[in-house]
Image: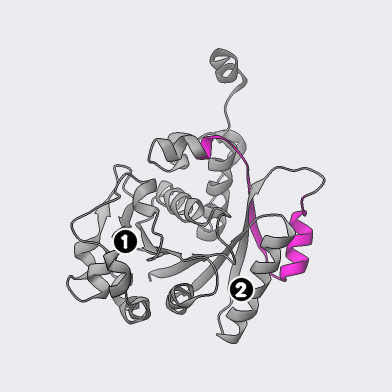
């Protein structure tokens, strides 16, 4: 049975889109049929991240009933499927995010796992994506402003009768000023699915217009995303066997 997972955050800039793309890529790495939908209609970035900034048919066409959902699906070289949204300013006035939940069953026909990258915050767009979810994963950083906004999001989800499946903590530098995973878990009262270390390979992957799971498969962030995907899919994955060998490091140096 297909499942819709919405990736959301209390604030922008925490790595939500990077997480949506790389979690989808990691699930696809384990052989799953995955579709990533750009539900952030105001500031869509999924297509930009995966070298498809402008496509003939996108989510906006689907929401405005000008196209069927399957017509807006594009397949990446890796096998990961995406449904981008329009970058056009004119389309902003026409967007109808509330139609997302009406398309829930149609989306489920397009893959085993449907990952929706929602808008950040608690506005109409974000709520529309949340209403579509079977499960919700919250992305945050290990700092007080991000955690505070994440807590607001959780309170809203409780009012909506939606449960948070887990939290992914991104941009982790492991310094003394950061909150530990245990503190994040206690404050948000939600399980921490994993932590993604800060690494320049995320920016390198963006410049290459690809998921870092593809461009830097043995990097710490890529292995962290694979660990989270394996946990969600309940499959075995030993990240230590996927790490760079000392000889590979030596010759790269």
Estimate the x, y position of residue 95 in percent, counting from the top left.
31, 73
Mark 2 or mark 1, earlier in chain: 1
Horizontal side of residue 45 vs 232, given as left or right: left
Secondary structure under the numbered disc 1 in the rendered image: loop
Residue 240 vertical position relative to residue 34 in the rendered view, above or below: above
Q: Nearer the viewer, residue 77 or 55?
A: 55
Q: Is residue 249 above or below residue 169?
A: above
User: Does the segment drawn in magenta span residue 4?
Assistant: no
- Picture coordinates of residue 129, whole percent (x, y): 44, 73
Q: Residue furthest right?
A: 176
**Side of 135 relative to 188 (left or right):** left
Is residue 187 a member of the stretch shown in magenta? yes
Q: Which residues are magenta?
A: 178-202
Q: Residue at x 19, y 71 (%)?
A: 68
Q: Which residue is mark 2?
A: 153
Q: Residue 18, position in %: x, y? A: 49, 50
With respect to residue 126, does 203 lie above or below? above
């Amino acid at each position: 049975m297909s499942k819709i997972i919405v990736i959301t955050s209390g604030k922008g800039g925490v790595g939500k889109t990077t997480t949506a793309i790389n979690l989808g890529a990691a699930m696809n790495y384990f052989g799953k049929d995955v579709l990533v939908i750009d539900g952030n209609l105001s500031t869509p970035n999924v297509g930009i991240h995966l070298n498809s900034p402008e496509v003939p048919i996108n989510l906006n066409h689907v929401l405005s009933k000008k196209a069927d959902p399957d017509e807006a699906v594009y397949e990446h070289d890796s096998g990961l499927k995406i449904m981008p949204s329009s970058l056009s300013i004119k389309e902003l006035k026409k967007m109808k995010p509330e139609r997302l939940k009406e398309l829930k069953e149609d989306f489920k026909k397009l893959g085993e796992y449907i990952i929706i990258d929602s808008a950040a915050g608690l506005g109409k767009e974000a709520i529309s994506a949340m209403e579509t979810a079977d499960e919700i994963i919250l992305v945050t950083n290990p700092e007080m402003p991000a955690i505070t906004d994440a807590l607001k999001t959780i309170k809203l989800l409780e009012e909506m009768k939606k449960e948070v499946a887990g939290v992914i903590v991104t941009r982790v530098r492991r310094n003394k000023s950061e909150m530990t995973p245990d503190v994040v878990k206690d404050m948000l009262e939600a399980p921490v699915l994993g932590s993604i270390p800060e690494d320049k390979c995320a920016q390198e992957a963006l410049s290459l217009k690809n998921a870092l799971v593809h461009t830097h498969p043995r990097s710490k962030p890529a292995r962290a995303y694979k660990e989270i995907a394996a946990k969600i899919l309940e499959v075995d994955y030993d990240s230590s066997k996927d790490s760079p060998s000392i000889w590979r490091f030596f010759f790269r140096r």
